[in-house]
């Protein structure tokens, strides 16, 4: 091999090595991008940095959730109605989930919510409806009729006896007031969050707080404790 051939060989090898390095860097960039997208869209916990104001608002919400848990558990033991005991107990469990989510955010992680599971359940229900829509529709109608019948029976019993449990009414009124305040506080916190994913988590929690308020309202209305005019 003469000098010119050696020079040509070395240049070709260098160009090949440079092309390999460029390819590796490109793949690394794509992999990093894919990893970031997986963090955002794939349900993997992301690491976030909170400002002092964000942390202060989240600490406030944490104290609210702790109070709700304490109250719901306490009122579940004090309520005389078995239905109300169960309602308070279910809400206490949800508040514990909210508290766990807030603790994760305060540690710099975005928690996974139950939205994906809910979407999967909706998809499964949709598939079942497509496969057997009449049976699904009949089942839903039966469930609604049973709930309405239970509510009507309870209302008729209350009207017949002229009895409204004032102690249970006070418990419901107190928790309804608490839920109104907590939901409003979440509204403020959502607007102060920089991270979109954190906003979505707080939105999800706020929605469930509003559902608690709706559950309390419906119980009070069905049992003659709340006259909607």
Image (cartoon, grey):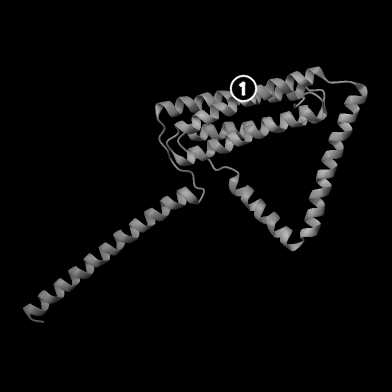
Q: Answer yes or no: is residue 85 visible.
A: no
Residue at image coords 79%, 54%: 137
Quadrant (top left, top right, bottom left, bottom right) of the N terminus: bottom left
**Is 57 above or below relative to 118?**
above
**Residue that carries the numbered disc 1 in the rendered image:** 67
Residue at image coords 58%, 35%: 205
Question: Would you say 52 lies left or right of 99 here?
Answer: left
Question: Would you say 133 lies left or right of 198 here?
Answer: right
Residue positioned most to the left: 3
Label 1 SS: helix
Which of the 4 image quadrants contains residue 181?
Answer: top right
Q: Residue 172 placed where, x, y %? A: 73, 23
Nearest the eye: 74 or 196: 196
Residue positioned most to the bottom: 1
Nearest the eye: 200 or 21: 200
Which class describes the residues within 10 Å of circle 1: few (<14), some (14-19), or many (20+)? few
Q: Residue 29 placed where, x, y %? A: 33, 56
Q: Answer yes or no: is residue 210 visible.
A: yes
**Is 14 above or below relative to 149?**
below
Q: How many marks?
A: 1
Q: Residue 123 placed where, x, y %? A: 65, 55
Q: Residue 143 placed where, x, y %? A: 81, 45
Nearest the eye: 228 or 87: 228
Residue positioned most to the front: 229
Nearest the eye: 221 or 167: 221
**Is 5 above or below relative to 137?**
below
Quadrant (top left, top right, bottom left, bottom right) of the C terminus: top right
Question: Would you say 59 lies left or right of 162 here?
Answer: left
């Amino acid at each position: 091999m003469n000098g010119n051939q050696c020079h040509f060989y070395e240049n070709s090898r260098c160009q090949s090595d440079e092309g390999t390095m460029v390819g590796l860097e490109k793949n690394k960039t794509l992999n990093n991008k894919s990893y970031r997208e997986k963090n955002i869209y794939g349900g993997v916990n992301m690491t976030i940095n909170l400002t002092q104001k964000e942390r202060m608002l989240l600490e406030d919400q944490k104290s609210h959730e702790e109070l709700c848990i304490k109250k719901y558990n306490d009122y579940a033991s004090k309520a005389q109605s078995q239905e109300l005991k169960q309602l308070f107990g279910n809400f206490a469990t949800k508040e514990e989930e909210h508290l766990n989510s807030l603790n994760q955010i305060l540690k710099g992680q975005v928690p996974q919510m139950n939205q994906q599971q809910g979407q999967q359940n909706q998809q499964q229900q949709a598939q079942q409806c497509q496969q057997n829509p009449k049976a699904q529709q009949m089942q839903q109608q039966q469930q609604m009729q049973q709930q309405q019948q239970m509510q009507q029976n309870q209302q008729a019993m209350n009207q017949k006896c002229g009895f409204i449990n004032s102690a249970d009414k006070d418990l419901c009124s107190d928790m309804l007031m608490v839920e109104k305040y907590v939901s409003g506080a979440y509204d403020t916190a959502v607007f102060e969050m920089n991270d979109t994913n954190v906003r979505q988590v707080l939105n999800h929690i706020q929605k469930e707080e509003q559902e608690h308020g709706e559950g309390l309202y419906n119980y009070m209305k069905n049992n003659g404790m709340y006259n909607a005019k």
